Amino acid sequence: MANADPPAPTIASESTEKPLKPKKTHPLHTSWIFYINELPQDQRGDPNAKNEGHQIRCLGKCSTVEEFWKVFKETEKPSELQFTEAFYLMREPCDPQWEKPEYSNGGRWRLRHGDVRSADYLWCELAMSAVGEKLGQLVDSHNSILGVGVSPRPTSVVVEIWTASLDFDADKTIEFAERFNSLILPHPVSFKTVYYESFEEVRKKGAK
């Protein structure tokens, strides 16, 4: 009697396989764009560079929390920048060129901290607060935040908060620094100087 043929192997139906669930993302209120204001490549790392000819370069755009962290982690840290370079995080479609006519009604808060080693910490907290829409608590209710920036100096670090309109509380510098520390920074720092300047004032200074 002949042996019966062995049973055919069972092939799992594709319909029985569980499809991969798409990764959940967390949208931001608006999109943001990372920029660097940097020296030309032939001047970077040169201590005798003339610090001229800076150029603004886009580093990446983020519309979700996940995209924010991806771009943030892939970029350099402020502590790795030259002392005349800067990072910016701007609300789309803004960019860090205060000379543009559309910024003529606005200005920026500038806070200088006396320890350049805090640059990375300040940048991280500032960037997170920007995309998390926490910075609006620092300015007048009529105003809105355009972007933020950080720039290391030889003995200090400067942070900037750009506003669409002039801040009515521009003369209350001590109060602003206190609110910045209490609302934005988990570990407060002391600031050597705090002031607000309109972009019109910046233009006039540059024209002299």
Image (cartoon, rainbow, N blue to C red):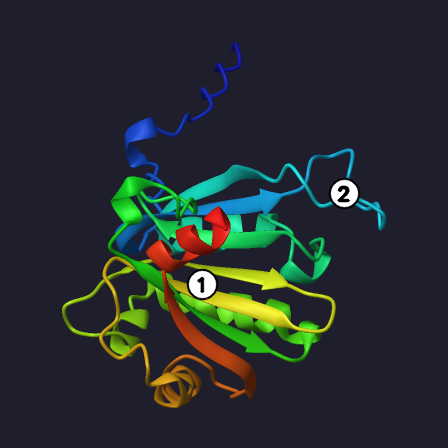
Q: In the rendering, at what x and y percent does residue 19 appear?
A: 33, 38
Residue at 32%, 52% (x, y): give it.
24
Tell me where residue 152 sits by quadrant. Answer: bottom right
Residue 162: percent from left, percent from top: 36, 60
Distance (Cα) linking label 1 and label 2:
24 Å
Callout 2 secondary element: loop
Count the numbered circles shown: 2
Left or right placement of residue 154 versus residue 179 in this view? right
The residue lying at 51 percent from left, 88 percent from top is 188
Q: Which mark is residue 44?
A: 2
- Residue with the mark numbered 1: 127
Residue 208: x and y in percent read 50, 51
In this view, the residue farthest toward the left is 142
Residue nearest the viewer, comparing 114 with 52: 52
Q: Position of residue 128 (x, y in %)?
A: 42, 66
**Which kind of residue does numbered mark 2 sit on?**
Arg
> Three-letter amino acid code at disc 1?
Ala
Mark earlier in primary sequence (1, 2): 2
Is 66 on the left or on the right of 15, as rendered? right
Q: Is residue 30 left or right of residue 8?
A: left
Rendered view: 191 above or below 148: below
In the displayed structure, would residue 18 be above or below residue 159? above
Where disc 1 sits, the SS reads: helix
Say if residue 207 shows up in the picture.
yes
Rendering quarter of residue 26: bottom left
